[in-house]
Image (tube, rainbow, N blue to C red):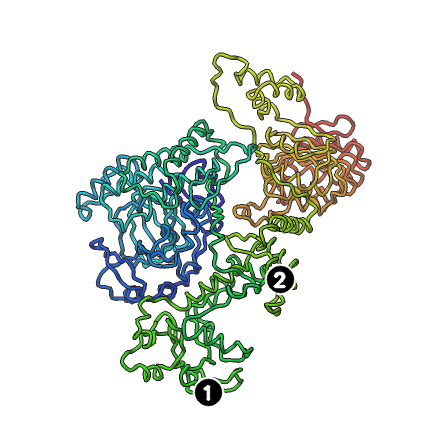
Amino acid sequence: MVKEMHSTELNVAYFQRNGFNTPLLFKEKTGLGLRVPTSNFTINDVRMCVGSRRVLDVMDVNTQKNSEMTMKEWQKYYEDPGKDRLLNVISLEFSHTKLENYVQSPTIVRQLDWVDCVWPRHLKDSQTEATNVLEDMKYPKVQKYCLMSVKGCYTDFHVDFGGTSVWYHILKGCKVFWLIPPTEHNLDLYERWVLSGKQSDIFFGDTVERCARITLTEGNTFFIPTGWIHAVYTPVDSLVFGGNFLHSFGIDKQLKIAQVEDTTKVPQKFRYPFFTEMLWYVLERYVHCLLGRSHLTTGVDMMIPPERPHIHLTHAELHGLKEIVLFLHMLPPNKKNVPELLKDPVALIQDVRTLIGQHRQDIRELAVTGRPILTVPEDLEHKNKIGYIRGPYNKSHVSFKGPKGTGIKSQKMNSGGDKGGPRRRRTRCKKCEACQRSDCGECSFCLDMVKFGGPGRAKQTCNMRQCLQPMLPVTAACIHCGLDGWGQTPVVPLQKGPQRCESASTLMECSVCYEIAHPACVQRLCPQFTGFINEDMPNSWECPMCCKLGKNTDYRPRHFRARQKSSDMRRMSISSDASSAFEVKHQPDHLSDSGGENDNKDIKELVPVKKRRNSECEIETKVQMPTEAPRKQALRVQLAHQLASNSSKVLKKPMYVVRPAPVVLSNSTNGNIALDKRCILSVFKYLQPKDLFLCSLVCKTWAQYSIDPSLWKKMDFTQKHISSEHLKGIVRRQPEILILDWCHINKYQLPWLIQRLTNLRELSLVSVNAKSVIALRSCYCAHLQTLDVSFVSNFNDAALREILCPNNDSRRGLADEKIRFRNLHTLKLAGTDITDIAMRYVTQYLPNLTHLCLSSCPRITDAGIAQLCTKPASTVTNLVSLNLSQSKLVTELSLEHLSKCERLTRLDLRHSTQVSTQALIKFAAKSEHNLQVRDIKLVDKRQVKS
């Protein structure tokens, strides 16, 4: 019932081919695109990231009822060795907290999750509250959960809300799952069990036919499909990260679970937020991606080019769209929940029906493309809603205005140019886990760093290295008395000498107004009130003045709020490589901070302004309307020149995706033999390529039949100049044997071709350019069985090492396939410049080699032959045929080595001057394979006359 997989097998194509109906287990997270904290992460770190006052929903294991508890109280309970009751936290959603930076969901989840690819982007970005209060929620906030369980916790059988699928990663501890498949019978039994009120008396796993049990240990990642009924037991204290997501490969089950929730009267608090609204957005997104029509008030219609090939939908998607329409139709009017952004729901339903009609005959095999149909929406209007625009030419947007009492004062203090004042910004503690980590190299701030190839403009620390307990600087001073935390006058800059920080500083910083002061000084000004200590950060409190004015009611840790605002502004400077290089090279003068406003007054209207939209960056021009179009065109031309400056490859916009010939499953010919595929292919196999081309012009059916792979098992392009049209034609026909002898094919065309020919078994590259042959050093050659690189000029030992050496491709799923040509049986190296060193590579990297041709290789000697015949070389047991004709340096000594090859039945030494015929006759006589010498120096197996 549970399928154990490797991370390389989990991709969009897997879901398109198989759907998502079976739980998946991954022993290692490598290759999943999943990012979690290290195993040193503790509950205390969770508290510092989400805040001590964060209210948690805590479940009592004995009663399975929920209660509320603050994060501080939960930590105290979790770390208490003498627990008087069992409590469990399984619903801490930590998006928009500091913990969010430490956790990234798997890549496949981010590709399929409707929240990411369907929900309007500007609504999600407008979310500011970290809590899960439905009134403050702008999107279904269910993507990142932290589960903290103590030993002995048990969660009874349940189905995740809204039929969501789930991913779990065990950071610490262990979990035991009981899993029950969501069949109609099992769901009916589940409804009765819930409504009976006897959950504590009946173990639901005993009432069904099949119930699987699986144990997850530290480091395991687990995916649970839609609707699976499961229970969870915690044998040891555990810390788990996970998330819920809706997707397009289980729509019918998701709707079924929503109906089960209605039947079992699940409270709205424990359901998927905005479930009905999400269904409307799903329909709109499919119509927009496939028909080009947008039904959102903020959307724009998309032109579908006529040459775009038909996109096939999977059965799960097509059936799911029908189920959504029926589900929404059956809802009463007060529960349809049509989103306000939707212009006309009736027109949307009509377009969905049109879409279903167009895709009614979609072919299942052609729907497996490896690319999701619902991609991350562009949301063009969202870029106009960004309030911050980076750039010194617009300083009013990037100046950080702090809260009342600090930001304004600090601006006035520094307005005169005095930059030598006391430091106010907090510094690293250098003790927490975040401070001890190294840069991740993946977040937006790391990609901006110079050491990772970025422009270095953001100057922000890695998201994973944000200090959990930043300290006040030793130069901080009280705003009232002017003394530091040790009662002395602060010295700026700090002088070397006896350190004053042996004891803790007595200064406190208010988390509301940011004023730094001694508690005694503030208490003298406001004796009626006392401050509240903030345990999330050292030397932090809510001062009596803010408590008196009631400003502390909306609490949020200062270091997170400031970091978020800084991130909003700084991330405007982070861009893709092309746009970053564009700004660095083309705007070196007028984008410096040294220029005044008057000097830049005229430049402001002409400088390209970069605005951040979603995770991408785009360049726009902030100019007057009459000149906007020419300037945009000029910027595009300059950017194109920049991209092409480091490459000789011609940039050409792809018109359509090249795919293999479609598989025609329908055999309905209506009695017309001329359209019967079996009959036509039986005739077509006798025709020449020119005749097949003429037949393809008869009708569309014959055009499809004429490129059937069974007619093109062998394709010969000898002495041809390969063009892009040739490449497309080859890919469409999927040959098994491809001959490219003496043809002109460059180093870009060959790897492009090889990775798309999944049925290719034999490849001949006689006298092709050596640079093109070296391009075979990719991970897509594993299916080749025969390779001929004879008479390739300048093909030497180094070139052979390049194409045979272990795979150095670090992409996900390819790093563990070390041997590129692991299925290669025949290798022809005739007429090349290889030496004996090349034989070492042959024995190391070709484990299944049986036929080897070294004809006309003038630098091969007896030493190279000895390497082939010495264990542990695989050729000792596998080599069947060896061609050494016209080898001038091979002597009779090689025959002694070749006698060790157990399966050698063919040896060609014709025109080898240093090997005599008598020596070959003795070699054949000693062999156990009944060999004979014919054609002077050709040793072959004796033919038995019948």
Q: Does 849 sit left or right of 402 as displayed? A: right
In the image, 550 versus 150, the foreground residue is 550
Residue at the farthest front position: 626
In the image, 674 versus 7, the foreground residue is 674
Where residue 159 is drawn, which disc sits there? none
Q: Secondary structure at mark 1?
A: loop
In the image, 522 versus 694, the foreground residue is 522
Name the residue at 65% across, 48% down: 637
Location of mark 1 (residue): 489
Q: Quadrant of residue 457?
A: bottom right
Residue at the farthest right position: 913
Residue 35 horizontal/vertical position (percent): 45, 55
Query: Marks 2 and 1, how far apart in space?
Result: 47 Å
- Specify the quadrant that holds the C terminus: top right
Could you tell me the amino acid type at mark 1?
Answer: Thr
Q: Is residue 356 above or below residue 845?
A: above
Residue 439 horizontal/vertical position (percent): 52, 62
Could you tell me the amino acid type at mark 2?
Answer: Asp
Residue 786 horizontal/vertical position (percent): 64, 34
Name the residue at 52% across, 77% down: 414
Q: Comparing marks 2 and 1, which lies closer to the viewer?
A: 2
Where residue 602 is drawn, which disc sits there? 2
Q: Is residue 418 above or below residue 238?
A: below
Name the residue at 68% across, 24% down: 942
Kindly check if marks 2 and 1 are in contact, taking CB atoms under 8 A apart as contact. Answer: no
Residue 738 horizontal/vertical position (percent): 65, 31
Q: Quadrant of residue 148?
A: bottom left
Q: Secondary structure at mark 2?
A: loop
Mark 1, other Cα within 10 Å: few <14 / some 14–19 / many ≥20: some
| Residue 280 visible somewhere in the drawing | yes
Name the residue at 79% across, 40% down: 858
